[in-house]
Amino acid sequence: MRSTAEPTTAIAKQDRCGDLPHRPRVLLGKMGLDGHDRGVKLIARVMRDSGIHVIYSGLWQTPRSLAIGARDEDVDCVAASMMSNSHLVLVPRLLNEMKAVGRADIPVNVGGIIPQSDVQGLLDAGVARIYHTGTSMDDIVDSVRATVKPYAPVVSSAREAVLARQISMAHAASLPAGTPVKRPARVVGITGSPGAGKSTLVAAMANEAVRRGQRIAVVAFDPMSPITGGALLGDRLRVDFNAVDDKVFYRSLAIVGEDYRSLPEIIGLIGAAGFDSLIIETVGAGQNDVAIRQHVDRTAVVVVPGMGDSVQMDKAGILEIADLFVANKADHAGEAKLVRELLDIAGGRPILETIATEGKGVVELLDALLK
Ligand code: B12
């Protein structure tokens, strides 16, 4: 392999996007059998530290799963990083899928190993910009900044495209007055400390709902930097959109702390778009992550073995708001002790044991939450 002068990772954290009409949202994705994830993770961090909201969809995406992500996340642009020499096949397919999902207007930027002789063909096919090895970090941030336009309602035959933009506008406190809202029949909250497996559980529940022939919506919150305004929204990558396609409407949003100001409107928009069931995943800050309770019908608190001694169980806060407990990672040491301690404080509230990574207990959890 030839070596390259690699860009430095030591770049200062600085909000470079506070002057734009809204926080830029970019979907950063890799299609096909391309395992070069090091560069794309670096790009994700640089964007985040410059004030951009980055939705990272992970490796091995199909053109369709990337297009669904771009539409439902209502991004300002797609940044496709291609290093596996499959750009001439996959990028035109991505552009076609963007049309098929109703958002051909979202610019698609491509970076990576793109031979000069392929550039014009890709531009002619509809790629907005192409970025080569050695692109500076400033140029990468500018590539996203340049795509941000003020929000206006999206006109599209795809109702997810319309809904996704309405959610963006609600989150930016600019939803047009009179936009129809309706609360879905079932709204559940999933909370718990970081690393408890909330996203994996939500993904497993979404899979199970699709297996049952249902359509389901998910709103996943992640932290927004109080310093730069940037965010890395990475929960989406737990869902295999190559399998569930657009039967799951998944939307990632960044907030500081527990600022759920826009949530009531967003819940209403999702219901009005025809979804009966909505799962809301919290940031999961810890014992004080309790505000979600005011917005949902039922709250599941996810706990894992090794949380600390039994005094933790008696503290006020997150454990009090549970309508049911999920003891996840049930295959880990300490599970029996955890369940015993939960029984002491549960006061009749259900305790479900799950192994999210294996889908165990997920059928029962979905039944318990969405019945
Ligand atoms: C590191 C590396 C690896 C590591 C990957 C580690 C990892 N987890 O990522 C390892 C050793 C595992 C590896 C393996 C392979 N590699 Co390799 N690898 C490289 C190498 C040396 C550097 C890639 C890198 O990380 N660069 C640093 C990052 C920051 O840069 P970047 O990703 O290019 O991104 C920059 C720009 O392109 C641009 N950019 C990129 N994407 C985007 C997107 C947008 C929107 C924007 C604005 C900008 C942008 O901005 C970035 C900053 O400047 C390159 C050679 C090279 N000089 O590029 C070969 C290279 C990519 N590898 C290559 C190959 C062939 C392979 C293997 C198939 C080798 C083999 N036979 O096994 C495997 C495949 C692995 C797999 N599963 O896919 C080839 C690809 C050839 C091609 N596409 O035509 C290259 C080009 C080497 C070569 N032959 O010259 N590789």
Image (tube, helix red, strand yellow):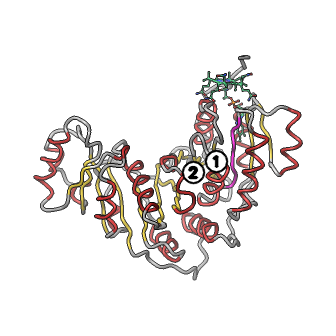
Residue type at mark 2 is Asn
Q: Give the left or right position of residue 335, taking residue 143 as reference.
A: left
Magenta stretch contains residue 217? no
Q: Give the left or right position of residue 102, taking residue 365 as reference.
A: right
The x, y position of residue 95, in whole percent, is: 75, 53
Which is the main secondary structure of the residues drawn in magenta? strand
Q: Quadrant of the N terminus?
A: top right
Which residue sits furthest left?
344
Label 1, residues with CA under 10 Å away: few <14, some 14-19, many ≥20: many
Q: Residue at the location (85% across, 46% down)?
A: 123
Residue behind mark 2: 242
Q: Give the left or right position of residue 244, taking residue 188 as reference.
A: right
Q: Residue at the location (73% across, 17% down)?
A: 2
Q: Give the left or right position of residue 18, taking residue 200 as reference.
A: right
Does dot 2 land on a helix, a strand or a loop?
Answer: helix
- For label 2, being within 8 Å of ligand 1 is answered no
The range drawn in magenta is 76-82
Q: In which quarter of the image is the C terminus?
A: bottom left
Please say if the residues under marks 2 and 1 sit with CB atoms less than 8 Å apart.
yes
All told, the count of numbered labels is: 2
The x, y position of residue 368, in whole percent, is: 28, 64
Q: In which quarter of the image is ligand 1?
A: top right
The x, y position of residue 147, in whole percent, is: 74, 53
Classify 286 as above or below 10: below
Give the image quarter of residue 141. top right
Label 2, residues with CA under 10 Å away: few <14, some 14-19, many ≥20: some
Magenta stretch contains residue 77? yes
Q: Residue at the location (68% across, 25% down)?
A: 7
Q: Residue at the location (35% across, 68% down)?
A: 296
Mark 2 to mark 1 CA distance (whole Å): 7 Å
Residue behind mark 1: 62
